[in-house]
Image: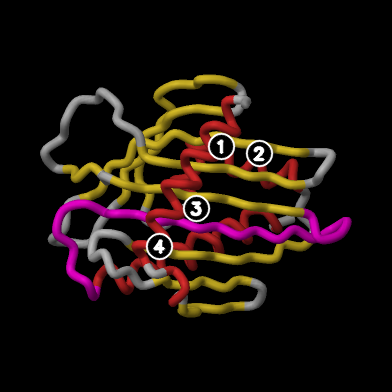
Amino acid sequence: MNRFLQYSTFTILVLLRAQLAAGQLDCVLKKEKGNLKVFSCPSKNANLNTIKAELILEGVTLDRLYEFLWDVENYVNWQYNTIETSILKKKSSTSMIYRTVVEAPWPLSNRELFTEIESDYDRSGKTLKIITRNVDYEFPDNEDLVRVPFSVGVWDAAILDNSTLKIVYTLTIDPGGSVPSWLVNMAIAEGPFVSFTNLKESLTQK
């Protein structure tokens, strides 16, 4: 079993456990615009929040999408409220660890994430899978930041025809600390909606 398959199997099992705890069968469409849909999946576990986003992209290749998603230092330009990103360790051509700081509204503290990202790009099968999950990483503590204790994300992209891609993204996250439920409910839909709108604009601009 190769490393990606081992990593994927472990991560998917973790994600499935989280989704079961989150009651993901109750996913509800929260926002929709054109070919973008964002779902919120209520959780019985107050600490876990799950979202799913679906997007159809026209005129974008898998190569372009892969290049865009792999450029983590560019996340500050399109991911919701992301104010810092830096690569900490390149493990291979398909795996690395990076750090992200996400701005939270006052009076909450900003969130800090340490994430391992790994990809499986099947050019012959015309599919792309990218898995992200939080990892423990030795890094100086910052008392102004709250470290996110749990995060698992899965990107699945496939070619529908010669000029059309379908992307399905699922994220289960515990933001850590104390966050009011109304704020979580707002961000859980607004965050991916803004991020995917920015992603679409970035990839389709001439």
Q: Please name the amino acid that badge 1 sits on.
A: Asp
**Dot 2 crowding, Cα within 10 Å, few <14, some 14–19, many 20+:** few
Amino acid of disc 2:
Glu
Residue 23: which disc? none
What whole-number distance in Å separates the C-alpha atoms at marks 3 and 2?
14 Å
Tally of marks:
4
Instruction: Report the front residue among 109 and 173.
Output: 173
User: Do tag 3 and tag 2 residues touch (Cβ < 8 Å)?
Assistant: no
Mark 1 = which residue? 71
Between tags 4 and 2, which lies in front?
Answer: 4
Q: CA separation, marks 1 and 4?
A: 31 Å
**Residue 67: which disc?**
2
Q: Earlier in the sequence, mark 4 or mark 2?
A: 4
Labels 1 & 3 near each other (Cβ < 8 A): no
In this orientation, does residue 189 appear?
A: no
Tag 1 near tag 4, CB within 8 Å: no
Q: Is residue 171 magenta?
A: yes
Q: Is the Cβ of the residue at disc 4 closer than 8 Å to that at disc 2?
A: no
Spatial CA distance of label 1 from label 3 is 11 Å
Above or below for 85 versus 150: above
Sort mark 1 into few (<14), some (14-19) or many (20+) by Cα contacts within 10 Å: few
Mark 4 → mark 2, Cα distance in angstroms: 32 Å
Q: Which residue is drawn at the image coordinates 70% and 65% (left, top)?
A: 56
User: x and y percent of residue 152 in the render?
Assistant: 42, 48
Disc 3 vs disc 2: which is toward the camera? 2
Q: Looking at the picture, how far across and down is residue 76, in whole percent? A: 44, 46
Please tell me how crowded label 3 is: few (under 14), some (14-19), or many (20+) other residues with Cα within 10 Å. some
Within 10 Å of the Cα at label 4, are there few (<14), some (14-19), or many (20+) other Cα atoms? some
**Which stretch is magenta?**
159-182
Residue 143 x %, y %: 11, 38
Mark 1 vs mark 4: which is more N-terminal?
Answer: 4
Which residue, given by chain and number where applicable, does mark 3 sit on? 78
